[in-house]
Image: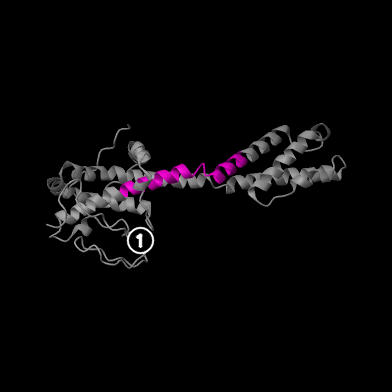
């Protein structure tokens, strides 16, 4: 298993130094095997949750949470404290999973490739028509290559033109500025776009990243949720658990906030369809319940 990054432990409330790219990647690598083993039932729905903002909330809350680590460990044992120790790694892993998902989405964007293939197609079709004007080739032979609407159509049309130039190369080689190297480059560009188009349509580039992202977000929700639940218990008489570890949904703007249910009155209605799911009830890893 990859080396687990050192958990963030601090006694100050100053913002933590933003992790570098290597730390983010190491955090996700450290949890990758565990995330892969998660069952479908462990993947939590996260309506309206911004993964990057949620990770930021968790990391920003960590200095305050760490101050309560001893109280959590005293009440819930080593298993409770382990959630605190793991939180930074889980939050960083979630941020990295979010980055990788964005990268997968970017990789599935074919607009740049499309622009190159469109230019290549225009070059070849214009030169073919010029050759036809000089009666060196038949204009109608390129009729099947004139379609340009849609990604797959432009790729097909471009590859047809490449094939036509090669078929008539002995006739046109000294009559056109197009070179053999040009044909090879155009063909490779069109084939790369075709491959990426197939991958995108099959979900090959995005689905693994999306799945890992969902698992990382679920792990963050569960880890942070357990910490919030334990804090609600140990800080019950202080009434400041939400100030120490605010909801992962608290970063959203422009939405009415749901009423947070009292742990001993969990049947209170929620007035926001995108509100945070309720924290689980019952003891944490065998610890005491919230009521006594």
Q: Nearer the viewer, residue 52 or 175?
A: 52
Q: Residue at x 35, y 36 (%)?
A: 33
Residue 248: which quarter of the image?
bottom left
Q: Residue 168: give x, y in percent of width and height.
A: 81, 35
Task: Using residue 93 as the reference point, say whether residue 268 is left or right of it.
Answer: left
Is any atom of residue 50 visible in this view? Answer: yes
How are the residues colored?
one colour
Q: Nearer the viewer, residue 184 or 193?
A: 193
Residue 36 part of the magenta-drawn span? no
Magenta region: which residues? 192-220
Quadrant housing the C terminus: bottom left
Residue receiving disc 1: 252
Is the magenta region chiefly helix, strand or loop? helix
Q: Nearer the viewer, residue 34 or 99?
A: 34
Task: Using residue 138 as the reference point, say whether residue 226 is left or right of it.
Answer: left
Task: Using residue 206 as the reference point, say whether residue 177 is left or right of it.
Answer: right
Q: Residue 195: give x, y in percent of width and height.
A: 59, 39
Q: Residue 151: give x, y in percent of width and height.
A: 63, 48
Is any atom of residue 59 visible in this view? Answer: no
Number of labels in the image equals 1
Quadrant housing the N terminus: top left
Disc 1 crowd, CA 10 A, few/some/many (<14, 14-19, 20+): some
Q: Residue at x 26, y 57 (%)?
A: 246
Residue 209 part of the magenta-drawn span? yes
Q: Residue at x 36, y 43 (%)?
A: 39
Task: Using residue 224 as the reference point, say whether residue 192 is left or right of it.
Answer: right
Label 1, secondary structure: give it: loop
Residue 50: which quarter of the image?
bottom left
């Amino acid at each position: 298993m990859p080396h687990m990054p050192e958990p963030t432990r601090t006694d100050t409330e100053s913002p933590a130094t933003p992790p570098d790219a290597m730390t983010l990647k190491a955090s996700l690598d450290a949890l990758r095997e565990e995330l892969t083993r998660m069952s479908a039932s462990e993947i939590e729905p996260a309506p309206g949750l911004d993964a990057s903002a949620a990770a930021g909330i968790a990391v920003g809350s960590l200095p305050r949470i760490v101050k309560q680590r001893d109280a959590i460990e005293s009440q819930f044992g080593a298993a409770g404290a382990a959630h605190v120790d793991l939180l930074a790694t889980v939050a960083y892993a979630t941020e990295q999973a979010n980055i990788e998902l964005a990268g997968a989405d970017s990789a599935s964007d074919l607009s740049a490739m499309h622009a190159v293939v469109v230019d290549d197609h225009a070059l070849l079709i214009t030169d073919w028509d010029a050759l036809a004007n000089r009666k060196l080739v038949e204009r109608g032979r390129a009729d099947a290559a004139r379609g340009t609407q849609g990604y797959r159509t432009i790729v097909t049309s471009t590859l047809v033109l490449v094939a036509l130039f090669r078929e008539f190369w002995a006739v046109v080689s000294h009559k056109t500025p197009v070179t053999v190297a040009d044909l090879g480059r155009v063909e490779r560009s069109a084939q790369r776009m075709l491959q990426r188009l197939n991958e995108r349509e099959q979900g090959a580039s995005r689905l693994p990243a999306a799945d890992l992202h969902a698992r990382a977000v679920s792990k963050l929700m569960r880890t942070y949720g357990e910490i919030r639940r334990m804090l609600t218990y140990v800080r019950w008489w202080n009434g400041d658990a939400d100030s120490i570890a605010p909801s992962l949904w608290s970063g959203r703007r422009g939405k009415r906030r749901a009423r947070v249910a009292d742990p001993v009155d969990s049947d209170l209605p929620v007035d926001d369809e995108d509100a945070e799911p309720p924290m689980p009830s019952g003891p944490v890893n065998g610890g005491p319940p919230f009521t006594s």
